[in-house]
Amino acid sequence: MTDIRHPASSSHDPSLDRDIAYRFLLKVWVGSVVAMVLVCAFIYWLYFVFLAQAVRADPPAPILNEASERIMVPGPNLLANPEFELQRLNKKDQARLDEYGWVDEGAGVARVPIDRALDMVVEQEARRAQQASEASADPSIEVPIEPDVPAPTDNGGSE
């Protein structure tokens, strides 16, 4: 049998036996690791630069003895018997609505019971309606208009 040789095989180069250049890959890998370490070191240094800058920009902490002591906050002001207190308040308010009294005695401003005040308003409006109906029936009659009485004001409960 005849041995057929390829013409390129006669001049055999041993460097062509390897398809991968391991030395080149090793150099690239080492260069990448060195670059990553340098970048991490730079970021670490930059962190402390910014941290020092932030500390300089912050105001100093107060140097007060009270700040270091624990501050006692008072508890809520709760009623011992809230139902009783509510009944007492309602009785007081009802008494103000049901009794006569002075709001400002010097100015002549008095407080009247609410039922009597409502009756007075109804009577006043009935008189106005009657006067208005009389005035519309006979235009020659001049009906005097009563000035409105201002509502009494409460000056903090002084009697």
Image (spheres, grey):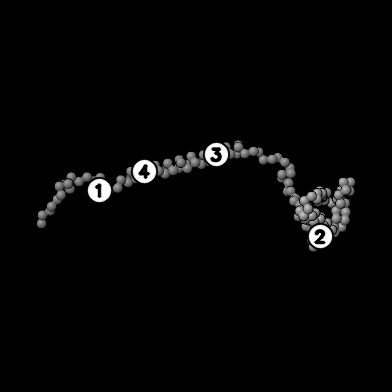
Q: Position of residue 36 (x, y in %)?
A: 44, 43
Q: Which mark is residue 28?
A: 4
User: What's under tag 1, amino acid-wise?
Assistant: Asp
Real-space CA distance between mark 2 and mark 1, rounded to the nearest whole angstrom: 108 Å
Residue denoted by label 3: 50
**Mark 4 element type:** helix
Q: Nearer the viewer, mark 2 or mark 3?
A: 2
What is the C-alpha distance between the residues marked 2 and 3? 65 Å
Residue at the extreme left of the image, as rendered: 1
Q: Residue at x 54, y 38 (%)?
A: 49
Q: For this view, does 129 lie left or right of residue 56? A: right
- Of badges 1 and 4, the one in the foreground is 4
> Label 3, label 1: how many angstroms apart (C-alpha)?
54 Å
Q: Earlier in the sequence, mark 3 or mark 1?
A: 1
Q: Which mark is residue 52?
A: none
Q: Tell me the tag on residue 17.
A: 1
Please name the amino acid that badge 2 sits on.
Answer: Asn
Q: Residue 17: horizontal and vertical position, in percent?
A: 25, 48
Mark 3: few/some/many CA within 10 Å (<14, 14-19, 20+): few
Q: Which mark is residue 90?
A: 2
